[in-house]
Image (tube, helix red, strand yellow):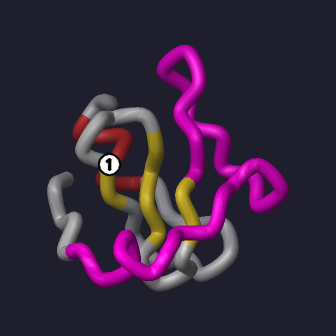
Amino acid sequence: MNKSLLDILVCPVTKSGLTLSKDGTELISKMGGMAYPIRDGIPVLLETEARTLNTDERLESGSSK
């Protein structure tokens, strides 16, 4: 994921910043408690495509931009 793109993307629900997951397959919205998939290098920022973070994921710091 391109860092300059990651810097401007926000959660479509909360408008808060997103962080890249450790494995690089999702964009995480800690405030919204959702993970948006990245498919073929393209972030899918649709609420209907996002999965809900579990309790452990919500508690992780995960601030690896």
Instruction: Give the total number of marks visible in the rendering.
Output: 1
Return the residue at label 1: 20
Task: State left or right for residue 12 relative to residue 62.
Answer: right
Residue 33 point in image, percent of width and height: 53, 77
Furthest-top residue in this view: 40
Q: Dot 1 lies on which element?
A: strand
Vertical placement of residue 48 versus 63, above or below: above
Question: What residue is at 42 percent from the left and 77 percent from the top?
Answer: 30
Q: What residue type is labelled 1?
A: Leu
Question: Alpha-carbon neighbours of circle 1 within 10 Å: few (<14), some, or many (≥20)?
Answer: many
Task: State left or right for residue 65 relative to residue 42.
Answer: left
Vertical placement of residue 29 versus 21, above or below: below
Residue 43 magenta: yes
Question: What residue is at 40 percent from the left and 62 percent from the top?
Answer: 18
Residue 45 point in image, percent of width and height: 66, 50
Vertical placement of residue 32 versus 50, above or below: below
Question: What residue is at 47 percent from the left and 69 percent from the top?
Answer: 29
Residue 32 magenta: no
Vertical placement of residue 41 versus 62, above or below: above
Residue 35 point in image, percent of width and height: 54, 58
Question: What residue is at 53 percent from the left and 33 percent from the top?
Answer: 38
Q: Which of 39 and 57 is in front in this view?
A: 57
Quarter of the picture containing the N terminus is top left
Region of the chain picked out in magenta, as a range: 36-60
Residue 53 point in image, percent of width and height: 53, 69
Task: State left or right for residue 4 relative to residue 29.
Answer: left
